[in-house]
Image: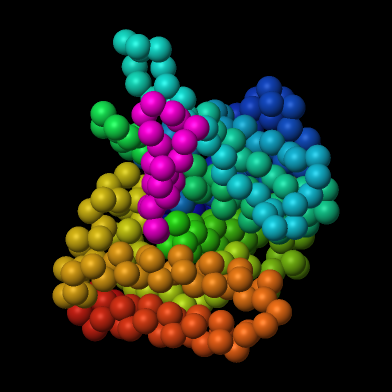
Amino acid sequence: MNIDQSNINELLNKYINFTNKICDEKKYPNNIKHVLYIIIPAFVIKYGLKYENMILDCFDKINIYIREKDNDLCTAYFSRIMKKNPEGVKPKYYTIKAVVLNQYKEASLVDMLDNIIHEFNHAVNSMINEIKFDDKTVSMRTGLSYMTYDVNDLNHLKEKSKDITLEEIINTKQTEDIMNIIRSFSKYEVHNEEFNNTFYALKHSIEGDYTSNAYYLQSFICKELMKNKTFVPTVENLRFNGNVDDISGWFDNITGNEGSYNKLTHLLEEILADEAKLAKAKFFKNYKINKIREKMRQVMDIIKDYENNCIFK
């Protein structure tokens, strides 16, 4: 969706009443309400008016919870609990969703925007084809990734798919896209002074295009893939529409190597785990660093194969 001086004020004002309504109902603090004023129109711009109702439904139905205690390991997360309806009631399975903010009291405006956008972007990209099941298992989709449960015990997580890190990389890129949409609002003459104060603060907090600190190493490794004009639009579209099972075959067909997508996602998971171990290690740090470097090289080789065989880059 394109914005310019002719429609910016109409768009920003359009969702004020909706935001006031959900914030009053959910008893959100004022600073949450103020960031939602600009986050919600930015999501509509990112995904288009075609999906406006779905985006509003997402912000309406998913609550933001603020934890009493800060957590240094995780600033925010998208939480879901799998539930089963009584026999004969449709849908057979459903989820209870929330965005949880662990670091709120000390969060800057930029950090609060980043956290809320990042977690709601997971949510928006998980709304279509969220759940799939058979007689033995039921799987819940978060963007690219699945968490699979036993149908007889929805508290028993049987398996996590190995593409969670790639999901986070793509979600981080889209968070940056939405943050930069919000930054672009300051270019226009906006009539609402409250909005202008927020845009002024952002303009002086972020120099140039916004870059998130989330998953920094993994995003760096995949930076060329995230610039690719075939990979990003295709994966974003399949992910948004819940057709993620098609991605591995499509990716392998371009690289010419069967299993290359699975190898890529597994290596990214391993690098993330190795990075966490390195941070805690007291001994053999050079050995662990070399392991990470070797896996980084393998990831970059797969990306190079994709790039070399990709017609539109």
Foreground pick, 31 / 260: 260
Predominant secondary structure in magenta?
strand
Left or right of 306? Residue 186 is: right
Would residue 56 be found to the left or right of residue 240 on screen? Answer: right
Q: Residue at x 74, y 39 (%)?
A: 66
Q: Image quarter for residue 94?
A: top left
Identity of the residue drawn at 35% across and 70% down? 264
Is residue 253 magenta-colored? no
Residue 148 visible somewhere in the drawing: yes
Eyeballing the image, is 94 above or below 86? below
Q: Identify the magenta region.
A: 140-163
| Residue 144 lies within the magenta run | yes
Please state the horizontal and vertical placement of residue 151, each as a whole percent of the image. 36, 29
Q: Residue furthest front?
A: 283
What residue sits 36% from the left and 38% below the top?
Answer: 139
- Where is residue 313? Give x, y as percent: 29, 77
Please tell me how many numbered marks the rendered image carries.
Answer: 0
Q: Quadrant of residue 40?
A: top right
Residue at horizontal 23 percent and vertical 53 percent from the top: 246
Residue 219 lies, in percent from the top left, at 50, 71
